[in-house]
Amino acid sequence: MADQGDVLTNLDNITGGNGANGANGHDNQPIAGLVTQYVKDLSVENPRAPDSFQWTEQPQLDVQFNIGARQINDEFTEVELKITTSAKSSQGTAYIVELSYCGLVGMRNMTEDQRHAFSYAEAPRILFPFARRVIADAVRDAGFQPLLLDPIDFNSLYLQQLQQQRQQAEQLAGEPAGEA
């Protein structure tokens, strides 16, 4: 047994000795993390195969993505990263891939602003590399070169969206009321 002088940390001293404000055993610190991730929906279309494998024209790629969040209960939120990509040329559509990649996120002791930021910026950042791999594999399995999506700065996009919403709110507040 260690002598009292060998104690590394006295847990009572962490909260000022009363043990009431976050002492050992109390769960009051903000925490968030990914519980699980999964493919919710995947659609791969290769409408012009096998003709499209002979096309020599470089296709135009179109990549669209959207982020959604659905609160499951007080502690869990499903974050959905939707990615749609297509390759089209003057000869037609080579392929279309639509992916809905989700993560179940656990969040506790967080303000609403923190929950929103984690759901729409941090969670998509965590999910994106896995969704990117699913897209690359789906395009490859359709018979084409794998599509490697460029990394996305979800935090910057989130901040841009917030700024746009604030500007729109300010514009609406500054407009004169209509006359009746």
Image (cartoon, rainbow, N blue to C red):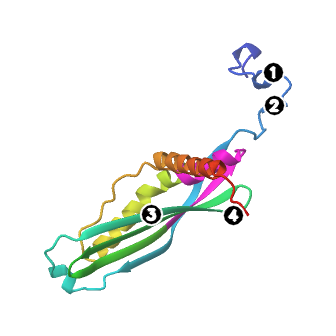
The residue wearing badge 1 is 16
Which region of the structure is painted magenta? 101-121
Residue that appears at 33% across and 59% down: 149
The residue wearing badge 4 is 72
Is there CB contact under 8 Å for labels 1 and 2? Answer: yes
Q: Residues within 10 Å of mark 1 (few under 14, many from 20)?
A: few
Vertical side of 114 occupied by 65: above or below: below
Say left or right for 53 vs 44.
left
Tell me if residue 155 is in the magenta stretch. no
Is there CB contact under 8 Å for labels 2 and 4? Answer: no
Q: CA distance from mark 1 to mark 2?
A: 8 Å
Q: Which mark is residue 21?
A: 2
The kind of residue on which mark 2 rests is Asn
The residue wearing badge 3 is 65
Mark 3, mark 4: which one is toward the viewer? 3
Q: Which mark is residue 67?
A: none
Q: CA distance from mark 2 to mark 3?
A: 43 Å
Dot 2 or dot 4: first in sequence order is 2
Dot 1 or dot 4: first in sequence order is 1
Q: CA distance from mark 3 to mark 4?
A: 22 Å
- Residue 90 image position (x, y, % from top left): 21, 78
- Residue 60 image position (x, y, % from top left): 25, 69
